[in-house]
Amino acid sequence: MTDPDAGARARWAKAAARADGLTDLGISGAVRRYYAVYFPVLVGVGLGLGFFPLSLGADLAQRRDDSGHRALDPAVPPNGSLPDRDG
C-alpha cells in the first residue's frame, strides 16, 4: 500500500530545498514604517471621524425642549439657556 501523502511530502521537500538560504530583507522596514507612521495616523483619523458625529449629536441633544422635539423657538438662544421669568 502506498502513502497518499508521499507526493505532497516530496513537493514540500523540493520547495524547502529551493527556499534554503533565501531571506527577505525588505519587509521588516515596510512593517516598521507602517506601524510607526501610517497606523497611528489612521487610528487618529478614524477616532476623529468617529467622535465628530457624536459631538454633533450632543449639540443637538442640548437643543431639544422638554417634549423631546428640537427647540425651534427663536426666543431660545443657541446655548439653551432661558432668560429669568422674574425679569
Image: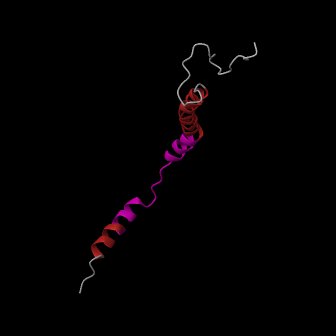
User: In this rendering, would 22 be left or right of 56?
Assistant: left
The magenta stretch spans residue 77 = no
Q: How many marks?
A: 0
Where does the image place residue 25, in percent across and percent down from the top left?
Answer: 51, 48
The residue positioned farthest toward the right in the image shown = 86
Q: Quick check: is 33 in the magenta stretch? A: yes
Quadrant assignment, res 60: top right
Q: Is residue 2 left or right of residue 68?
A: left
Compared with residue 5, is residue 34 higher up or lower down, i.e. above or below?
Answer: above
Question: Residue 17 location in percent, x, y?
Answer: 39, 64
Q: Nearer the viewer, residue 63 or 39?
A: 63
Q: Where does the image place residue 8, in percent across and percent down from the top left?
A: 30, 71
Q: Is residue 58 above or below residue 6?
A: above
Magenta stretch, residue numbers:
13-35
* Residue 33 screen position, x and y as percent: 56, 39
Q: Nearer the viewer, residue 58 or 53?
A: 58
Q: Main secondary structure of the magenta part?
A: helix
